[in-house]
Image: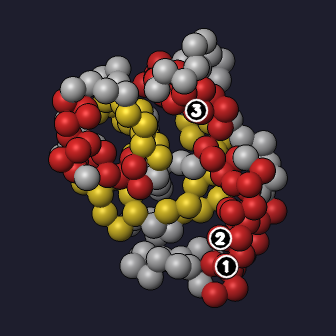
Amino acid sequence: LCQFLRKICREQHPLVGICFGHQAVAHALGGVVAVNPAGTQAGLRSYNVTDTVRRSLSLTDTQQELKVFIHHADAVVAIPAVAESWGYCASGHWGMTIGSCCLTTQAHPEFSTPSGRRVLRQILQHDREHGQMDVTAFAGLSVQELDRQLQLVESPTQHKEMAVAFARLLGLLQI
């Protein structure tokens, strides 16, 4: 997989990475992926819109945050030298841009669709009732935090901005 990802990037083919894809691209190109020192991250998160995010996702100057869903226990803690970070927080580097051909994010824009929300709800409920699935994580979420995140599953997100940028990069959308 890493060899394939390096080839795709070297040949400048369009590439989008989501969650594990974000981690795989970072690792393949020399970044560092580790069990998240901040513990499992799950639910609705609000990320600050940096200049790199604004440029990479074609966001307006007035957009200051991007709300999206996440669920992960691993994180990109160091990005490859060829990448620009979208920002660093409890999710590690939550996204990155590599040249004009690669966008990746730790977030899950697909969790904002009706079926994605059902899946996220099921994951959060499972974590609440049985403990988190990833036993390698440093710290799981508390029952109180899982209950709070379950209440936020129907919250509005800005997943479309991310999805449009991905579709445009892949040549699926001509806007």
Could you tell which of marks 3 and 1 lies nearer the N-terminus?
1
Instruction: Report the Cα–Cα distance between label 3 and label 1.
Output: 27 Å
Question: Residue 169, relative to residue 135: is it above or below?
Answer: above
User: Which mark identifies residue 126?
Assistant: 1
Q: Which residue occupies 42% across, 75% down?
A: 137
Task: Report which residue position mark 2 lands on.
Answer: 123
Q: Which residue occupies 20% across, 40% down?
A: 6
Residue 96 screen position, x and y as percent: 38, 36
Instruction: Report the Cα–Cα distance between label 1 and label 2.
Output: 5 Å
> Farthest residue in the top direction?
175
Residue 113 screen position, x and y as percent: 73, 46
Crowding around mark 1 (Cα neighbors within 10 Å: few <14, some 14 to 19, many 20+) is some
Question: Residue 141, relative to residue 51: is it above or below?
Answer: below
Q: Which residue occupies 41% across, 55% down?
A: 20
Q: Quadrant of residue 62?
A: top right
Could you tell which of marks 3 and 2 lies nearer the N-terminus?
2
Crowding around mark 3 (Cα neighbors within 10 Å: few <14, some 14 to 19, many 20+) is many
User: Which mark identifies residue 27?
Assistant: none
Specify whether 165 is left or right of 124. Answer: left
Q: Secondary structure at mark 1?
A: helix
Residue 28 screen position, x and y as percent: 22, 48
Instruction: Report the Cα–Cα distance between label 3 and label 2.
Output: 22 Å
Q: Are marks 3 and 1 in contact (CB under 8 Å)?
A: no
Q: Secondary structure at mark 3?
A: helix
Q: Secondary structure at mark 2?
A: helix
Task: Report which residue position mark 3 lands on.
Answer: 162
Specify whether 147 is left or right of 66. Answer: right
Q: Are marks 1 and 2 in contact (CB under 8 Å)?
A: yes
> Farthest residue in the bottom direction?
130
